[in-house]
Amino acid sequence: MNRKFLFLPIYVLLILFSFNFAKADVLIEDVEENSMQSAVAAFGQGTIETGSGQQGNYVIFSCGVPNDIGNIINDPAPGIWDDLDEGACGGTGQRCAHGIWGGFVSDPDSEEITCSWTEFGTVFSAGSMRFTGVDPSDPIIGVDCDTGQGVEATAPSINTEAGSQVLSVFTLGLLTTGTSPIADPTLANRAEPEGDWFANANSGVQNVLSIGISELEEIAGPTGTVSVSLGDVPFEWRACTIALRMASPRSVPTMSEWGLISFAAFAGIAGFFFLRRRQATA
């Protein structure tokens, strides 16, 4: 009985420390993708689901459209969304453009979001990711984008925080009309992602691909670049890196807290030997 009472405060103290030092990383709840194409009639809108999860989750979605005719992408509906990036792909033809938006959702169930654009086309591709554990007051650590043309697209490196989720979004437009790319793009400079989408729309006249790749960053600092390729198929591209801040920063013990931890460990060991000694002399 004495042993139980001696070690109970130590157990409680260690449990409290374990709660204080627990981290709440940003995690992926759901991933959705959609593609639309028509060889018969042009259209001016497409949809993407927010995915299901928990009330208060943060959702990022991207809508990709052809840009041969100077498309302007309208604000998505319903809801009010933060504009994270809008613009055309690089290269001389500007064959693609995208819009990326983010925001918190109040419904745990999936919701259909409509993207629309000013000049009708024959293709549309989109993807979304739904995250939990995102800071409700300051969700975005940073956003940076690059554009280009070639056989590889590269999302830039940005500085991030420990426990963040980093999403790389790629929009590609093939240079050769009617070319169908390989089913799975090749990923470079990244480990196995936490989640990803790949939406390919090809009408035979226009083509646009949307690719999303997300990975948890365990430590703070530069994320490094992320690249995708479609073999030897050339394309124009726009690529963005978005870092999401977690709601609760990771706790690191102070010097005084380390002292309490050391004292608890010492007291536990001393108490154990004291009881053993009393039992031996009884």
Image (cartoon, rainbow, N blue to C red):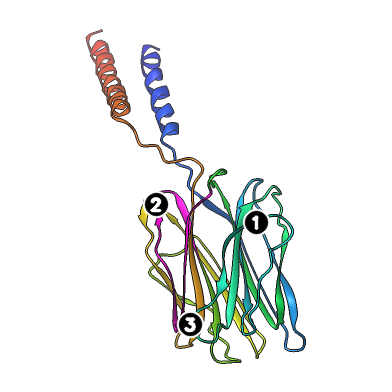
Can you say which quadrant of the picture contains the C terminus? top left
Q: Position of residue 214 (x, y in %)?
A: 49, 61
Residue that label 2 marks: 218
Q: Residues within 10 Å of mark 1 (few under 14, many from 20)?
A: some
**Tags 1 and 3 touching, CB below 8 Å:** no
Residue indicated by mark 3: 230
Q: Residue at x 54, y 46 (%)?
A: 133
Please name the residue shown 60% across and 68% down the image.
99
Q: Residue 122: horizontal and vertical position, in percent?
A: 70, 83
Q: Secondary structure at mark 2?
A: loop
Apparent side of residue 79 relative to residue 33 in the rendered image (left or right): right
* Residue 158 among those drawn in magenta: yes
Left or right of 70 on screen, residue 246 = left
In the image, is residue 215 part of the stretch drawn in magenta? no
Q: How many marks?
A: 3
Query: Residue 15 at what x, y percent from top left?
Result: 43, 28
Regarding mark 1 in the picture, which secondary structure is present there? loop
In the image, residue 75 sits, relative to residue 234, either above or below, namely above
Label 2: few (<14), some (14–19) or many (≥20) C-alpha neighbours in 10 Å = few
Q: Position of residue 149 (x, y in %)?
A: 46, 83
**What's the CA distance linking mark 1 and mark 3?**
31 Å
> Hey, which residue is sitting farthest right in the picture?
41
* Mark drawn on residue 81: 1
Q: Is residue 258 above or below residue 159?
A: above
The secondary structure making up most of the magenta span is strand
Q: Which residues are magenta?
A: 139-168
Mark 3 / mark 2, whichever is N-terminal: 2
